Image: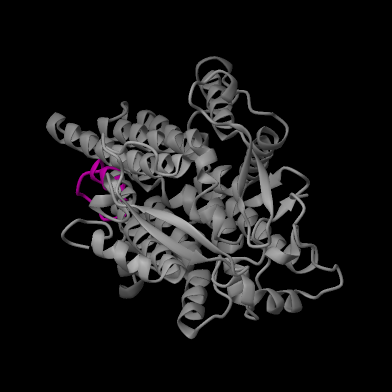
């Protein structure tokens, strides 16, 4: 179980009574308490169309060589029926089901049963048991940070198989790509439904639950803040990082192996996609302890948005560039490839250094140097849920003096580089940068709305000092 709450709720209290009694004190921490019509409409659209969108993209590659318009035109002009397209779609197979169960079980084993050893010999890496942020109910959960270790072990097994053991073909993921999609959907819906039931009937911490009275919103955005099984299996940390992000680089390796099998070579575009996305994945696991301080862990509840999203949306839509390059191998000119690499590395540098500056500023309470100088700050005062007044500081130096969310700008630069590596032949590989632009802009606005409510006039002073959100001079 999670660390014991400082204010345990009586076991006889209903979810509704808990929600109402905590409403005044928790305020806007996490997702909304009340659902307006626009939020409900958005939730229903996502629940209905996100799974169809994933299927459409994967089907377009499998049956229409990655053309996004051809399937719709075929149906619109009568050249094909939806039933014809569905009939040509591979169904789940015994091999895919066994492979997926083995994969998830292996990641659960690495997460729960193997204490982290990387922090003992890798300088600068923070692993092992770490504490998360304080939840609205006053809980401080402990986490077993061992994602880097899990990634390393998983990829060592993959490489050993590819070069020595030959237990399975390196193209096994691509060869079972659509059957695995049905397995991933099964897990995504199962874990989301289980988390919903658990939140109502046996929550890890009842005081950290939120109930809106709307079933669809509760299902999508989650009821429990930090659902857990036992002491260490934390749903949010596991599904955010494993199995989806560990699989990301394995999926790309399988796509590269398939490209070589079909076309006799691995193109420099495929190498760029593999390298740039591997940097992002490794950065995630190297900074997994820092991830405990992000919006996903500190504010989001665990529902379909995270459960299904991490099982299906992430591994299937974040890897579209590699999938596209299997069907359309692109060999870039040397100057173009160098430009894409430079854009990706520059984006990663801005992303990482901006986050590093913020983390350094927080850890030292501003007693540090940012770009060789003492940081400029805006002093803030805010009132917490218990009525106590607190002082805080907002950084306006370094990257945080250029724009209020320049770390997101760096992330978007990296996202664009992945897409540009695929050339300009089709729209499909560019979905990722469009999606990330929408996601990060929305996250930027969410974060600023929360900060404006928290800091009031002090936040207005901050936005006056740093007027732009993502692009200096533009937005």
Q: Position of residue 288 (x, y in %)?
A: 52, 39
- Residue drawn at the location 40% of the way across and 57% of the way down: 57
Please indicate, yes or no, whether residue 90 appears anywhere in the rendered image.
no
Q: Position of residue 80 (x, y in %)?
A: 38, 68
Farthest residue toward the bottom? Answer: 37
Q: Please identify the residue farthest to the right as the structure is shown.
A: 12
Depth check: give the residue in front, 401 or 152.
Answer: 401
Q: Which residues, given as a range, are shown in magenta?
A: 415-429
Q: Quadrant of the C terminus?
A: bottom left
Q: Residue 98: x and y, percent?
A: 67, 41
Q: Classify residue 276 as left or right of residue 89.
A: left
Q: Is residue 421 magenta?
A: yes
Residue in the foreground of this view, choosing between 307 and 33: 33
Q: How far across and how far down the image is residue 121, in percent?
A: 55, 18
Q: Residue at x 27, y 39 (%)?
A: 344
> Number of marks in the image?
0
Q: Residue at x 21, y 49 (%)?
A: 425
Q: Give left or right: position of 185 versus 353.
A: right
Give the side of residue 123 with respect to residue 474, left or right.
right
Q: Nearer the viewer, residue 12 or 371?
A: 371
Residue drawn at x 63%, y 72% is 25
């Amino acid at each position: 179980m999670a660390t014991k709450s400082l204010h345990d709720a009586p076991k006889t209290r209903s979810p509704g009574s808990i929600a109402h009694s905590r409403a005044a004190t928790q305020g806007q921490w996490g997702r909304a308490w009340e659902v307006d019509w626009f939020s409900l409409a958005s939730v229903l659209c996502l629940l209905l169309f996100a799974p169809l969108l994933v299927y459409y993209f994967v089907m377009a590659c499998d049956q229409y060589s990655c053309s996004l318009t051809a399937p719709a035109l075929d149906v619109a002009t009568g050249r094909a029926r939806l039933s014809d397209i569905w009939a040509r779609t591979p169904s789940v197979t015994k091999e895919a089901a066994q492979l997926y169960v083995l994969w998830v079980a292996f990641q659960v084993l690495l997460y729960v049963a193997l204490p982290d050893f990387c922090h003992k010999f890798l300088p600068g890496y923070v692993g092992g048991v770490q504490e998360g942020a304080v939840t609205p109910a006053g809980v401080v959960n402990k986490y077993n940070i061992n994602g880097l270790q899990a990634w390393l072990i998983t990829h060592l097994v993959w490489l050993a198989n590819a070069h020595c053991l030959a237990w399975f073909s390196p193209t096994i993921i691509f060869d079972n790509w659509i059957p695995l999609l049905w397995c991933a959907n099964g897990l995504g819906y199962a874990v989301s439904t289980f988390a919903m039931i658990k939140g109502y009937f046996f929550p890890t911490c009842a005081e950290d639950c939120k109930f809106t009275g709307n079933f669809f919103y509760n299902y999508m955005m989650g009821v429990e803040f930090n659902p857990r099984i036992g002491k260490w299996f934390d749903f949010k940390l596991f599904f955010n990082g494993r199995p989806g992000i560990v699989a990301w680089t394995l999926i790309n390796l399988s796509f590269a192996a398939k490209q070589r099998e079909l076309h006799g070579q691995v193109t420099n575009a495929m190498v760029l996609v593999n390298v740039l996305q591997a940097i992002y994945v490794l950065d995630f696991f190297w900074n997994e302890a820092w991830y405990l301080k992000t919006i996903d862990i500190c504010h989001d509840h665990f529902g379909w948005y995270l459960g299904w999203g991490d099982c299906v949306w992430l591994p299937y839509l974040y890897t579209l560039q590699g999938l596209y390059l299997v069907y359309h191998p692109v060999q870039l000119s040397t100057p173009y490839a160098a430009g894409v690499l430079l854009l990706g590395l520059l984006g990663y540098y801005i992303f990482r250094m901006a986050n590093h500056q913020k983390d350094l500023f927080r850890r030292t309470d501003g007693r540090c140097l940012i770009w060789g100088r003492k940081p400029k700050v805006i002093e803030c005062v805010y009132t917490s849920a218990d009525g106590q007044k607190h002082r805080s500081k907002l950084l306006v130096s370094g990257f945080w003096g250029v724009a209020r969310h320049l770390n997101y700008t760096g992330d978007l630069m990296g996202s664009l580089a992945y897409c540009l590596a695929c050339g300009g032949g089709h729209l499909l590989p560019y979905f990722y940068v469009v999606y990330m632009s929408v996601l990060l802009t929305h996250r930027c606005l969410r974060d600023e709305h929360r900060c404006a409510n928290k800091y009031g006039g002090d936040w207005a002073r901050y936005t006056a000092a740093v007027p732009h959100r993502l692009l200096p001079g533009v937005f």
